[in-house]
Amino acid sequence: MENETEYVVLFPFMAQGHFIPFLALAQILDRKRYTVVFVNTPLNIKNLLKSFPPSSSSINFAEIPFDTSDHGLPHEITDSLPYNLIPRFVEATPSLKLPFRNLLSDLIDIHGGEKPLCVISDFFFGWAADVAHEFGVFHLIFSCTGGFGMACYYSMWMNLPHRFCDGDEFLLPDFPEAGRIHVTQVTPAMSMAGENDPFTIFLQKNFVSWTNSDGLLLNTVEELDKLGLMYFRRKLGFPVWAIGPLLLSEEDRSKTGRQSTINSKQCIQWLDKKDPKSVLYISFGSQNTIPAPQMMKLAKALNSSSRNFIWVIRPPLGFDINSEFVAEEWLPEGFLQNIHEQDKGLVISKWAPQVEILAHKSVAAFISHCGWNSVLETMKYGVPVIGWPIGADQLYNAKFLVEQAKVCVELGRGVDFEVTQEEIVDKIELVMGENGEGIRRKACEIQEMVRDAIRDEENFRGSSVKAVEEIFIAALLRKEKIIAETK
Ligand code: UDP
């Protein structure tokens, strides 16, 4: 369906992990000839405008003010806010409600009274449903995470305190199908949450407000993420659509923020020299780092393993992520020199061209923190995972990869686990060695499934392609109904 006169308002949370799938959705809508109004705070809009100038598409950017100084936070942020301040920042976001309402009113005026076809807001902005409905506009929540991970996260926050009835494990009362949750899968914020804790109050209120919306969109694949989708369909009683994987191209992504600290050509040339399926890729996402003792064990394991590797390295936990990496302090003596001499490994400081690496035929496995974008990327390229989740939904994404998708072995969880050099080598071999044939085959099957979901061909339209069309039919029907009722 194509419609040049309709416009859609997209409103993501202000962090790169949220922008990326929203921008990917904006590009799909742009291709379908909807006009997109991409709403965010002034600093983010300024940055986005530099990368996506108005002439390049029909994506328009609109800013609304967000003053966080009352909350003792920097005036406005992009994704460089320290991790520990994110909950306080999230808690401050309901103050965006009035500016967003004013913006919507202005947009309708500017469009001569024509209302947007739909408002799609971030999963942190459940309150936007009320604003959209006040103007008689269809509203959807968009969760940039996967179905299973989000379902566990939602259920765990809504069912506090957790009742451990089986030693260190428990079942979620409204999501028993998820299987046992281990105490190491409860995030520190959840285990410390009390009735008066502002983040708990915010999240629970936000999740309840989802029920005011007209539907939920998830950045996942219908055929792959059945349990999580089933949970939300049962829980929320409104349509839930799987529209993923929504990923930006490497080029577009570099426009939204960090750029690779290595020339990607250099990286690809290094990979080109290696045998097919012979390289291990290691990365902990855009913001996470591991503690120094774990980093030392990982380096020793990589030294003793026979496998080639690419490792995206940052200062360990507790140090400024942007500060200089002190190899003499955080890596075994001579590590960098050894791997350089043997041409066995490529250590990239801070930021690597991840998608290009995962897409390369020499890459065989990924040690990942299991952030959802990394999970989608690795599945899209059929690369099995050695899971090293650190916190948040990563813990449930890893569970999903192990138990549902069956393309992952988990190494450890959180920042406190004790890992040995031998265990790391064993897990690498379990995936890359002879016994890993099953998991590698499964990763190829999943790859097909993920690619099929976004195939849009004359005789085959994947589930995510169809879902996007259904959404806009539903929005159009709603709009026509409201117009008919007000006549
Ligand atoms: N990423 C990258 N290069 C890096 C580290 C991360 O391109 O060196 C990208 C990665 O491809 C993914 C995103 O950053 O798209 C990280 O998102 P994810 O959801 O995996 O983890 P988060 O950073 O949100 O914890």
Image (cartoon, rainbow, N blue to C red):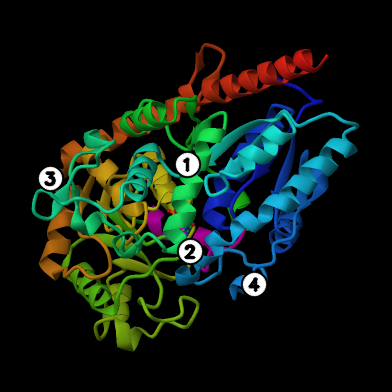
User: Disc 3 residue type?
Assistant: Glu
Give yes or no for residue 318 being in the magenta stretch.
Answer: no
Circle 3 — which element? helix
Could you say where residue 96 lies in the image, as x and y percent from the top left?
67, 55
Where is the C terminus found, in terms of image quarters? Answer: top right
Q: Earlier in the sequence, mark 2 or mark 3?
A: 2
Number of numbered markers: 4
Tell me the mark number nearer the camera, choosing from 1 and 2: 1
**SS state under label 1:** helix
Disc 1 beta carbon < 8 A from ligand 1? no
Q: Which residues are magenta?
A: 255-272
Mark 4–mark 2 Cα distance, whole angstroms, equals 15 Å
Sequence-wise first label, 1 or 3: 1
Question: Around disc 4, counting alpha carbons within 10 Å, would you say few (fewer than 14), some (14 to 19), or many (20 or more)?
Answer: few
Disc on the earlier residue, 1 or 2: 2
* 92 up-or-down from 332: above or below: above
In this view of the protein, can residue 407 be seen by the observer? yes
Dot in front, 1 or 3 = 1
Indicate whether 85 appears above or below 230. below
How many other residues sit within 10 Å of disc 3, few (<14), some (14-19) or many (≥20)? few
Q: Residues within 10 Å of mark 1 (few under 14, many from 20)?
A: few
Q: Which residue is mark 4?
A: 70
User: Residue sitting at 72 percent across and 21 percent down?
Assistant: 479
On the image, numbered disc 3 is attached to which residue?
A: 434
Q: Which one is earlier in the sequence, the residue at label 4 or at label 2?
A: 4
Where disc 2 sits, the SS reads helix
Please state which amino acid type lies under the numbered disc 2. Pro
Q: Which mark is residue 388?
A: none
For disc 1, the marked residue is: 208
Q: Circle 2 sits on which residue?
A: 87
